[in-house]
Structure formats: C-alpha cells, structure tokens
Image: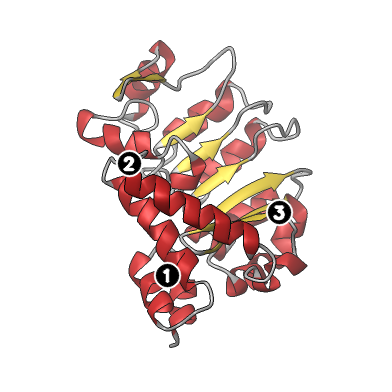
Amino acid sequence: MDALARVLADPASNAARRQLAEAGDPRAALIRAQLAVWDEDRAGRMGSRAYNKALGEANALADAHHWDWSGKVADYTQEFKFHRGLVAEVTIACDKLVDIFEELCKQAPIQHLKVRGPFGGWPQLVAHPRFAQIVSVDVSKQKDFGDRELIELAKSARSTNLRWLGLLQTTVGRAGMEALAASPHLANLVRVYYEGDYNPTPAYSDIDGFFQVTPSLAGKELEKAFGPRLWLNPPDDKIDQWRALADQHAAT
C-alpha cells in the first residue's frame, strides 16, 4: 500500500499523512503546516506564535495551490477545503453526493460534509458505508432539512464517528433533537449547533481564555431521559475537546 492509499484507508490518521509528506508528495509543505496548526490547537495553544506562523503558511499554500492540489475532487464539486494537507471537506448537494460518494472518497480522505438540499437521498447517504468516516456534517440554512432527516441520521449505525453537527436555520424541532439525544450511535458527538424555541444545547462563553459551558434545562431533561451526552453537557475532563471543536475546521 502506497502512502496516499494509507491515508485514504484511514482518513483520521495523522501518522499516515506524515508518511505521505515524507514520501515526497507535492502537498508535503501544506501537510506539515496544517498538522502543525492541528498540534498547537490540540495542545491548547491556539493563537500562539507557532500556531499563527503555521496557519499563515498553510493558508498561503492552500490559496496558491487550491486547484492543482485538489486532484479529481474538482470534477465533482468546486467547493472544497484542505484539512491536514489534503482535501477533506466538500460542499455538495445531497442527491449528487449519494451518486458519487464512493468515488469521491477514493480520490480524497473526505471527513467533512456541507450538504445542501434537496434531501431526497438523505436516507441512502447516512446509510452509505463511507458515511462511517465522516466527522462533521453541516446542513445549516437548509430549510428542507427537518425532523425526518435528523431522525434518519440518529438511526444510522454509520454515524458513530460524527463529532460535529451544524443545524442552524433548519426546520429541525423537538422531535429531531430528542431522536439525536436518544441515538445509541452518537456517543462521539461533541458539538451541535442549533437554534430554536426548544433548544437543549448548552450555552458557552470564552472570556479571556476562560471557557465555560452552561447546560440548558431542556438538555438536562434529555440527559435524565437518555443518559449523559457530550453535546448536551460535557464533563470537566472533556471541556478542552468541546472547545477544540468550536470550529468545524478543528473537527479532525
């Protein structure tokens, strides 16, 4: 198995990416720079001199080589981003993604999806074997995404690696949020961005580096019914992880 194949086989692996850089891949400088950003962030040093230096290098490289380092991904969508040196995030219509998901994941280590409607193929998407490698899903500003779609996600055994979920400005309501809390498959879900009259997600604040999470009454009720959930009320030893996932780009 060559270095790129190792990354595609294990998209979450930083070690595989480092091996790819050492093998002389054209994206080696970007891989190293974005991994340095990742390392600083995970060490709680976001904003450090090393972080800002690596981030500046990474952004310059990604801008300069956006198209020539995207490979065949650009044949499927023109909206994509690099994570840890390789294309890992795409913005794409749900029904189109269902048709090309397998081939897309053979071209790049896709872990982040910004999915756009219509959502007719959503049940097939969340049941797809490749969905198991997805870490973040953003369906924000999609008015045709509602309780039915969120319930399908909650039911999917392929959603076990999902850690970040964007639901802003959707039509998701109480039924969908309750299904999310009841799901046996979403133990790794850490952050849910949601707004609505019934909102079980906690409030959070970050003032001068002091990070605080305040559970909501609705969230406490869901935990009482379904048990502890990180996205509802992270324990003290998970606060740093919760904070690191404040930005989708830090999701993996």
In the rendering, at what x and y percent does residue 192 appear?
48, 32
The kind of residue tagged 1 is: Asp
Q: Which residue is mark 1?
A: 10
Residue 189, image quadrant = top left
Mark pair 3, 2: CA separation: 29 Å
State the quadrant of the N terminus: bottom left
**Circle 1 residues within 10 Å: few <14, some 14–19, many ≥20:** some
Mark pair 2, 1: CA separation: 29 Å
What label does residue 48 carry, if any? 2
In the rendering, at what x and y percent does residue 181 appear?
44, 31
**Circle 3 residues within 10 Å: few <14, some 14–19, many ≥20:** few
Residue 213 in view, yes or no:
yes
Cβ atoms under marks 1 and 3 closer than 8 Å: no
In the rendering, at what x and y percent does residue 85 appear?
49, 64
Which SS class for mark 3? loop
The kind of residue tagged 2 is: Ser
Mark pair 1, 3: CA separation: 23 Å
Which SS class for mark 1? loop
Q: Residue furthest bottom?
A: 1
Q: Is residue 243 left or right of residue 25?
A: left
The residue sitting at 65% across, 35% down in the picture is: 148
The residue sitting at 28% across, 32% down in the picture is: 239
**Circle 2 residues within 10 Å: few <14, some 14–19, many ≥20:** few
The residue sitting at 29% across, 41% down in the picture is: 45
The kind of residue tagged 3 is: Glu
Precedes in sequence: disc 3 or disc 2: 2
In the rendering, at what x and y percent does residue 71 appear?
66, 73
Q: Which residue is mark 3?
A: 79
Residue nearest the observer in this picture, 203 or 48: 48
